Image: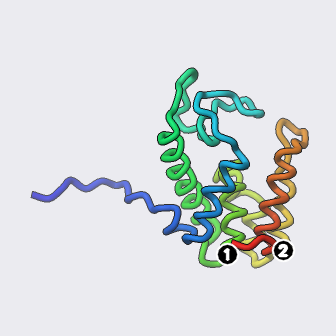
Amino acid sequence: MTAPTTSKAPRRSLIAIVGAAAAAVLMVLVPQNEGTVYKTYRDLGGVLTYCTGATEDAQWGKTYTPQQCADQLDKDLASHADGISKCVPMDKLTPGQRVAFVDTAYNIGVSAFCGSSMARKANAGDMAGACAALSLWVNVNGKPVKGLVNRRAVARAFCEGKRPV
Protein backbone atom coordinates (compact mmCIF):
# COMPACT_ATOMS: atom_id res chain seq x y z
CA MET A 1 0.00 0.00 0.00
CA THR A 2 1.35 3.41 -0.94
CA ALA A 3 1.02 6.55 1.07
CA PRO A 4 -1.69 8.91 -0.09
CA THR A 5 -0.50 11.64 -2.42
CA THR A 6 -1.12 15.25 -1.70
CA SER A 7 -1.12 18.18 -4.05
CA LYS A 8 1.14 20.12 -1.73
CA ALA A 9 4.87 19.84 -2.39
CA PRO A 10 7.17 19.46 0.61
CA ARG A 11 8.34 22.75 2.05
CA ARG A 12 11.84 23.72 0.98
CA SER A 13 14.21 24.86 3.70
CA LEU A 14 15.54 28.39 3.88
CA ILE A 15 19.06 27.07 3.20
CA ALA A 16 17.87 25.24 0.08
CA ILE A 17 16.28 28.45 -1.24
CA VAL A 18 18.84 31.15 -0.43
CA GLY A 19 22.01 29.23 0.49
CA ALA A 20 23.66 28.65 3.83
CA ALA A 21 25.43 32.01 4.12
CA ALA A 22 22.35 34.10 3.34
CA ALA A 23 20.18 31.92 5.60
CA ALA A 24 22.59 32.39 8.50
CA VAL A 25 22.53 36.18 8.05
CA LEU A 26 18.72 36.24 7.79
CA MET A 27 18.30 34.22 11.00
CA VAL A 28 20.23 36.96 12.85
CA LEU A 29 19.17 40.06 10.89
CA VAL A 30 15.40 39.54 10.88
CA PRO A 31 15.13 39.13 14.68
CA GLN A 32 17.27 42.26 15.10
CA ASN A 33 14.93 44.15 12.78
CA GLU A 34 11.65 42.74 14.04
CA GLY A 35 12.30 42.04 17.70
CA THR A 36 10.65 39.04 19.31
CA VAL A 37 7.51 39.30 21.42
CA TYR A 38 6.07 36.14 22.93
CA LYS A 39 2.49 37.41 23.02
CA THR A 40 0.30 38.75 20.23
CA TYR A 41 0.32 42.50 19.69
CA ARG A 42 -0.61 45.04 17.00
CA ASP A 43 2.27 46.34 14.90
CA LEU A 44 2.60 49.95 13.69
CA GLY A 45 0.25 49.19 10.80
CA GLY A 46 -2.34 47.67 13.15
CA VAL A 47 -1.67 44.09 12.03
CA LEU A 48 -2.03 41.38 14.67
CA THR A 49 1.50 40.04 15.11
CA TYR A 50 3.43 37.61 17.32
CA CYS A 51 6.90 36.20 17.85
CA THR A 52 9.37 37.68 15.34
CA GLY A 53 6.96 39.55 13.09
CA ALA A 54 4.73 36.56 12.35
CA THR A 55 1.14 37.30 11.34
CA GLU A 56 -0.22 33.99 9.98
CA ASP A 57 -3.04 32.61 12.14
CA ALA A 58 -2.38 35.22 14.84
CA GLN A 59 -4.73 34.91 17.81
CA TRP A 60 -5.24 37.77 20.22
CA GLY A 61 -4.01 37.01 23.75
CA LYS A 62 -2.00 33.91 22.82
CA THR A 63 1.45 33.44 24.35
CA TYR A 64 4.26 31.60 22.54
CA THR A 65 7.42 29.85 23.75
CA PRO A 66 10.89 30.77 22.50
CA GLN A 67 11.00 27.46 20.59
CA GLN A 68 7.63 28.11 18.95
CA CYS A 69 8.87 31.53 17.85
CA ALA A 70 12.14 30.10 16.48
CA ASP A 71 10.24 27.43 14.55
CA GLN A 72 7.77 30.03 13.22
CA LEU A 73 10.60 32.30 12.07
CA ASP A 74 12.29 29.44 10.21
CA LYS A 75 9.01 28.49 8.55
CA ASP A 76 8.10 32.10 7.69
CA LEU A 77 11.51 33.01 6.24
CA ALA A 78 11.47 29.90 4.06
CA SER A 79 7.95 30.69 2.91
CA HIS A 80 8.84 34.29 2.03
CA ALA A 81 12.07 33.26 0.29
CA ASP A 82 10.19 30.63 -1.70
CA GLY A 83 7.51 33.16 -2.58
CA ILE A 84 9.89 35.75 -3.96
CA SER A 85 11.91 33.08 -5.78
CA LYS A 86 8.86 32.68 -8.00
CA CYS A 87 9.10 36.31 -9.17
CA VAL A 88 12.87 36.89 -8.95
CA PRO A 89 15.05 33.82 -9.58
CA MET A 90 17.42 33.34 -6.63
CA ASP A 91 20.18 31.96 -8.85
CA LYS A 92 20.43 35.41 -10.49
CA LEU A 93 21.07 37.11 -7.12
CA THR A 94 24.16 37.45 -4.96
CA PRO A 95 23.86 36.22 -1.36
CA GLY A 96 23.64 39.86 -0.22
CA GLN A 97 20.81 40.56 -2.63
CA ARG A 98 19.00 37.45 -1.38
CA VAL A 99 19.34 38.73 2.20
CA ALA A 100 18.07 42.20 1.25
CA PHE A 101 15.11 40.95 -0.76
CA VAL A 102 13.98 38.25 1.68
CA ASP A 103 14.25 40.63 4.64
CA THR A 104 12.21 43.23 2.75
CA ALA A 105 9.61 40.70 1.57
CA TYR A 106 9.33 39.42 5.14
CA ASN A 107 8.45 42.96 6.18
CA ILE A 108 6.18 44.04 3.30
CA GLY A 109 4.85 40.68 2.08
CA VAL A 110 5.59 38.54 -0.93
CA SER A 111 2.88 40.00 -3.15
CA ALA A 112 4.00 43.57 -2.45
CA PHE A 113 7.60 42.61 -3.14
CA CYS A 114 6.77 40.76 -6.37
CA GLY A 115 4.69 43.70 -7.60
CA SER A 116 7.35 46.26 -6.73
CA SER A 117 9.92 48.17 -8.73
CA MET A 118 12.55 46.17 -6.83
CA ALA A 119 11.41 42.96 -8.51
CA ARG A 120 10.84 44.59 -11.91
CA LYS A 121 14.30 46.15 -11.91
CA ALA A 122 15.99 42.96 -10.68
CA ASN A 123 14.31 40.96 -13.45
CA ALA A 124 15.40 43.55 -16.02
CA GLY A 125 19.02 43.17 -14.86
CA ASP A 126 19.09 46.63 -13.23
CA MET A 127 20.45 45.54 -9.86
CA ALA A 128 21.65 49.04 -8.95
CA GLY A 129 18.09 50.27 -9.48
CA ALA A 130 16.61 47.30 -7.63
CA CYS A 131 18.86 47.94 -4.64
CA ALA A 132 18.08 51.67 -4.70
CA ALA A 133 14.34 50.91 -4.78
CA LEU A 134 14.64 49.29 -1.36
CA SER A 135 14.83 52.81 0.07
CA LEU A 136 11.30 53.58 -1.15
CA TRP A 137 9.71 51.17 1.36
CA VAL A 138 9.99 53.20 4.58
CA ASN A 139 6.41 54.39 5.22
CA VAL A 140 3.61 53.15 7.45
CA ASN A 141 0.23 54.75 6.83
CA GLY A 142 1.90 57.25 4.50
CA LYS A 143 4.52 58.45 6.97
CA PRO A 144 8.23 57.53 7.10
CA VAL A 145 9.25 55.43 10.10
CA LYS A 146 12.82 55.79 11.37
CA GLY A 147 13.12 52.06 12.07
CA LEU A 148 12.16 51.25 8.48
CA VAL A 149 14.57 53.86 7.13
CA ASN A 150 17.35 52.18 9.13
CA ARG A 151 16.22 48.68 8.14
CA ARG A 152 16.19 49.54 4.43
CA ALA A 153 19.61 51.19 4.69
CA VAL A 154 21.03 47.93 6.05
CA ALA A 155 19.19 45.91 3.37
CA ARG A 156 20.50 48.24 0.68
CA ALA A 157 24.07 47.85 1.96
CA PHE A 158 23.70 44.06 1.69
CA CYS A 159 22.10 44.39 -1.75
CA GLU A 160 24.93 46.60 -3.02
CA GLY A 161 27.61 44.29 -1.61
CA LYS A 162 28.78 46.75 1.03
CA ARG A 163 28.13 44.22 3.83
CA PRO A 164 29.66 40.79 3.38
CA VAL A 165 27.53 37.66 3.55
- Helix, strand or loop at label 1? It is loop
Q: Is residue 19 left or right of residue 148?
A: left
Q: Position of residue 40 (x, y in %)?
A: 60, 28
Q: Position of residue 107 (x, y in %)?
A: 70, 48
**Farthest residue, direction front:** 66
The residue wearing badge 2 is 128
How crowded is the residue under tag 2: few (<14 C-alpha within 10 Å), some, or many (20+)?
some
Distance Cα–Cα, label 1 vs label 2: 12 Å
Where 21 sits versus 60, above or below? below
The image quadrant where one finds the N terminus is bottom left
Where 97 sits versus 68, above or below? below
Q: Position of residue 38 (x, y in %)?
A: 58, 32
The residue wearing badge 1 is 93
Q: Amino acid at mark 2?
A: Ala
Residue 131, image quadrant? bottom right
Q: Position of residue 134 (x, y in %)?
A: 81, 60
How crowded is the residue under tag 1: few (<14 C-alpha within 10 Å), some, or many (20+)?
some
Question: Residue 39: which disc?
Answer: none
- Helix, strand or loop at label 2? It is helix
